[in-house]
Image: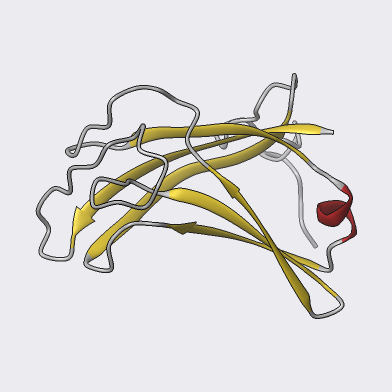
Amino acid sequence: MRYDFEAKINLRRNDGTAFECDNLEQSRTDDFCVDIIFELIKDGEKQWERYLNDDPAVWSSNSFNNFRFTFTAREAMLAADEIYMIISGTHEDVDIYFDNVSITPQGEQRALCAEIVNGDAEVRLFM
């Protein structure tokens, strides 16, 4: 099964100033933004899958930026006991802010937090 990953990310130096980075840079140079790593754990053994941003837009240092990619849930991911998402790659003096993270099966509409899943939630009595 293929999935779409989406998030909004902003990078700021620890002192609150903007951090300029090159969204198209793929190796961890001084201009590198971030990557997403899934850490898969099965029977105590760790395995990692690294993903770069597929959104080609130039990153703005003053706002949240799109980070997206598509991935296939392979056997190692499906069989994992635990899966962790790690946002990494930037300098240690840079804070990573993220919002609106979603992982959606490809081709399906993403539900928004504002949508009510249980249509009668407003009138439901809880006892």
Q: Residue at x 72, y 33 (%)?
A: 3
Q: In x, y percent, where is residue 39? A: 66, 63
Q: Is residue 95 above or below residue 125?
A: below
For the residue pair 95 and 72, the one nearer the viewer reads as 72
Q: Is residue 54 above or below residue 89?
A: above
Q: Which image quadrant is residue 73 in?
A: top right
Horizontal side of residue 47 vs 86, given as left or right: right
Q: Which image quadrant is residue 122 in?
A: top right
Q: Quadrant of the N terminus?
A: top right
Horizontal side of residue 43 vs 92, given as left or right: right
* Outermost bottom residue: 44
For the residue pair 7 and 41, the one nearer the viewer reads as 41
Q: In x, y percent, where is residue 33? A: 33, 46
Q: Is residue 107 above or below residue 89?
A: above
Horizontal side of residue 15 vs 122, given as left or right: left
Q: Quadrant of the C terminus?
A: bottom right
Q: Residue at x 76, y 51 (%)?
A: 125
